[in-house]
Image (cartoon, rainbow, N blue to C red):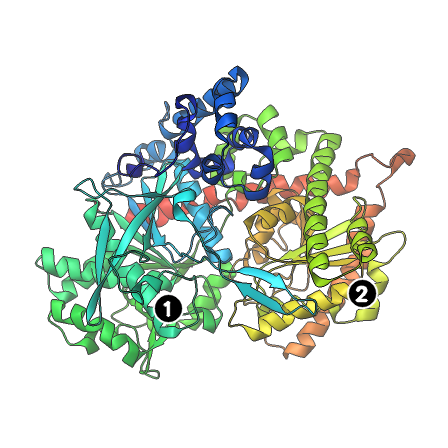
Amino acid sequence: MPLSLFRTLPIPNLHLPAPLAPLADLACNLWWSWNPWARKVFKAVDPARWERERNPLDLLFNLDPRRAEALAKDVHFIAQMSEVLEAFNAYLHPSTPTWFERGVGARKLPRGIDWSHPVAYFCSEYGLHESLPFYSGGLGVLAGDHLKAASDLGIPFIGVGLLYRHGYFVQALDADGSQQHFPMQLEFDRMPTRRVRGPDGGALMVTVDFPGRDVHAAVRVVDVGRVPLLLLDTDIEENLPEDRLISSHLYIRGREMRLCQEWLLGVGAIRVLEALGLEPCSYHINEGHSVFVNFERVRVHVREGNMTVEEALADVRKHTVFTTHTPVPAGNEVFDVNMVRRYLERLAADLGVEVSRLIDLATLPEKRESFNLTVLALRTSSRANGVSLLHSKVSNNMWSKVCAEEQTAVQRIEHVTNGVHTLTWLGPDLQDLLYAKADLAVFEENYVGGHAFDFWREVPDDAIWQAHMTQKLRLLTVVGDRLRRMLARHGASPDEVAAVAGSLDLDTLTIGFARRFATYKRAGLIFRDPGRLEYILKNPKRPVRLIFAGKAHPADRPGQDLAKLVWQMSRDPRYVGHIFFVEDYDMRLGRMLTQGCDVWLNVPRRPMEACGTSGQKASTNGLLNFSVPDGWWDEVVGDEEAALTGWGIGEATGVEDHMPEDERDDLDAERMYTLLEREIAPTYYDHRRPNGSGNAAPHAWIEHFKAAMSVLGPRFSAGRMVSEYMERFYGPLSRG
């Protein structure tokens, strides 16, 4: 049971009539974000505001008192709310054993995993929902899905991270496509977060030693179903003005400020767990940003366990798994040794060792000036994994010297392929089909086990097609609205605005591309041959539409240039009405795109994509993947069972991975054009109108569509992913 339900302060200044008071607890638990009936209750409270903001707590704060009184007396609404609250309480307090409870007995996992000894998970960002916009992309959304799946499985689990006052950033494109970055100003009291109580009953605060001073952090919690997520916030009165800014921006540019954030996360996380009386059974370091957790655990062992430093390090390693998420060198955090030295001095003094002893754990012989967090994580963990089979192979090549060292317990970087939380990403209309017909217990078992789920094959084609087209219409409506507002801001004429929005018809084959704009993801690859692309897009019998979305990091100029190129192509007269760029990519737009497009495009420079979970979200909704065999898709290409689920761009042999970049780009672009012309567009269009009916389901396409949902959905679900972590890492590494 989530401890946070008993250890939070009341929500300040929220006043609701007594019959509506339970809505506050429901609003503060992200369970509503993957429960369609809960969302319908909040929508009924204020439909217009819900559509604009999707933040249930802020919706309650802004509820007109007269409307509140009317709802409190509305018998139908109270009945609807009560039914959802009953389901919510049944989820939190299930009457039958959860997957974890059944698994512990069946597999005899260590008994130490309980709510006083949970699995502890550390990450620098969490993408749970757009109403909590302190995430940037794949790593954060993966972490959010991990927590949701752990909740569904009933695993005693707790997450820890940072709470960023200004979030990531709001993206706006100038008329020429230049990316502008605007900070958010988040009001935590109006978001699904609550202050955590300390042992004295007051607001919990922890103190972290920094060079020459102490920094204090308030602690807030986000309840994610049964799982509490604890978040540290330095923007409090007890801190110096400059220290209040430490938790201000996610992935801030300044190197020392970034180090401050990661030091705060590592040291502060352990001190929060100590303050709450929690002793985790095992520790999951999700990417190197949070690895200072291991240093603080060494300090605790030496101070309280009467261990030597070497004994403490051995114990820390024994219960730790580290997940690396990127084969891109820039993604493995490195700091100047002299900068880090000052932060380690007090720790070294507490341990009774020279600072150089700690520095040595994070440096390589050939790069003594670089303090490498990935190296530190590998040397202070006993198990490590990449996030796809191919990524683990790449990671083993990258870090083979470190893994071969006598002091490194990690001998091999294993793999647990990422997955996505099905009910977060499955479209509402497909969910309606699922809830109406499927046995949800069977659904859960198949998705946790990664087994094919034949339910989708049994749904009539017309029902599947109608659900998909409704989701597609919802996407095109949102895209049209965003484009109208953006073009109006740029000064486009009413005729121009109307022409662009009016070209978003339902019948056109729609391909989505949405992700972080990093150069290795090659968002511009499809423009390699502009003339041929124009011919494909404008084919009168088989037209094609491309929708792009994504942000480039404020410090990534090449990535911003790539976004600018795509925007300019969307405004090129040759492509207007066929290519669209939608600004300010967030989780809501991500859901819409992966639910409403027909095909999902992914063209990273192989093998630089660690996993690429957006394609998994797409396949959950039946979209067909059109991808380079990299990351997770490398595990699908050539699999006979998954043959109908999409198209691979090139070979998965690795022979071409070291070709000159220009040659490889030319080759992959040619393959893209050929597949679009000869396979994808014909498959989509050739059987669209049997018997002359424009509304009839295209049965050949739906055969592919059902295969994606039935085969890939379970195989790449977060339930399957977290169950693997439980059985292969959390259980074996836990304290008995």
Taking the image as shown, residue 256 lies to the left or right of residue 171, namely: left
Taking the image as shown, residue 278 lies to the left or right of residue 103, namely: left
- Residue with the mark numbered 2: 533
Taking the image as shown, residue 421 lies to the left or right of residue 228, namely: right
* Residue at 56% over, 53% down: 586
Q: Amino acid at mark 2?
A: Leu
Front in this rendered view, residue 601 or 277: 277
Query: Percent from the top left, x then y, of residue 474?
Result: 69, 41
- Residue with the mark numbered 1: 258
Query: Percent from the top left, x then y, of residue 587?
Result: 55, 49
Q: Amino acid at mark 1?
A: Arg
Query: Percent from the top left, x then y, of residue 250?
Result: 43, 61
Residue 639, compared with residue 32, is above or below; it is below
- Identify the image quadrant of the N terminus: top left
Circle 1 residues within 10 Å: few <14, some 14–19, many ≥20 = many
Residue 199, compared with residue 354, is above or below; it is above
